[in-house]
Amino acid sequence: MSLALRFLGVGGAQAVELGSSNAVLERDGAPLLTIDCGPEGLTAFLDAYRTIPSALFITHAHLDHVGGLERLFYRAYFDPQRRARVRLYLPLGVIGVVHDRLATYPNAIAEGSGNFWDAFQLIPVQRGFWHEGMWFDVFPVRHHAPGSACGLGLRGSFVWTGDTRPIPEALAHYGRGDELIAHDCALRGNPSHTGVDELERDYPAELRRRFVLYHYGSAADGETLRSRGHRVAHAGESFALADHEPAADAGRG
């Protein structure tokens, strides 16, 4: 079995030319779990795999990360083979916001009698979840409001920070092995995102060597990050991963 992390998009909310920041965990070249579903992200997934995602984890409810879910709803709802079978793993603190943004319109379909959630298999998650025999850790990150966003980890393979300020205490735990770490980074930080100066200040060099940066503001910004010695993802780029570690202590944090 081989695992890889493919970046479908790497841009910040306004960098639409770089694609919505999301990725796909692949197993033997096939999509296993999709992380986030922005408007451009769903398009990139369809282009890459010629089908819709079968399972998604959503880090938070900003529209550049969930704006493709309405379109995914229509693709799944009107396909008898996919309706109610698209797994949607949502952290508890994210469910309500996604519901408010996407599921409260009284007629999800023009014909009526259909609910937004009818297209999905909603699986609420807190500390983590099982998917395809693998345990995925879920942990809170620092994205503006407490409890509003989470990261994702597969022990021994990768950590995806989602949109976040620096989280050295979390990565000391969830990235304590030799995992590839996909980290939010722009040239300048703000209350929701990490700036490169903060990244270099708050993480030791030995940890940064495992970083792959994404969610930056432009192609030029990406080149600036590279010029400072950082590994920076391109849209469509794939990174081979080590096999995951069995999670004997799954759910214990």
Image: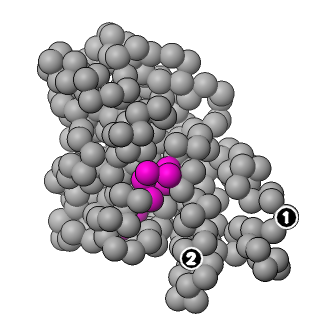
Q: Quadrant of residue 209?
A: top left
The boundaries of the magenta stretch are: 32-42
* Disc on res. 106: 1
- Residue at position x 35%, y 16% in the image: 187
Residue toward you, 207 or 87: 87
Location of residue 247 (image quadrant): bottom left
- Residue 75: image x %, image y %? 55, 74
Type of amino acid at the residue the image marks with label 2 = Ala
Does the segment drawn in magenta span residue 41?
Answer: yes
Q: Are marks 2 and 1 in contact (CB under 8 Å)?
A: no
Location of residue 197 by image quarter: top left
Asked if residue 153 shows in the view, the reply is no
- What label does residue 76 carry, if any? 2
Q: 97 and 51: which one is in front?
A: 51
Q: Secondary structure at mark 2?
A: helix
The local crowd at label 1, few if under 14, some if 14 to 19, many if 20 or more residues have their Cα within 10 Å, is few
**Please, what is the three-letter code of the amino acid marked with disc 1?**
Pro
> Residue 9: x, y in percent?
35, 46
- Measured in 3D between alpha carbons, the distance from the residue under mark 2 to the one under mark 1, in whole angstroms, is 19 Å
Q: Is 12 rendered above or below residue 4?
A: above
Mark 2 surroundings within 10 Å by alpha-carbon count, few (fewer than 14), some (14 through 19), many (20 or more) = many
In the structure shown, which secondary structural element does the residue marked by tag 1 occupy?
loop
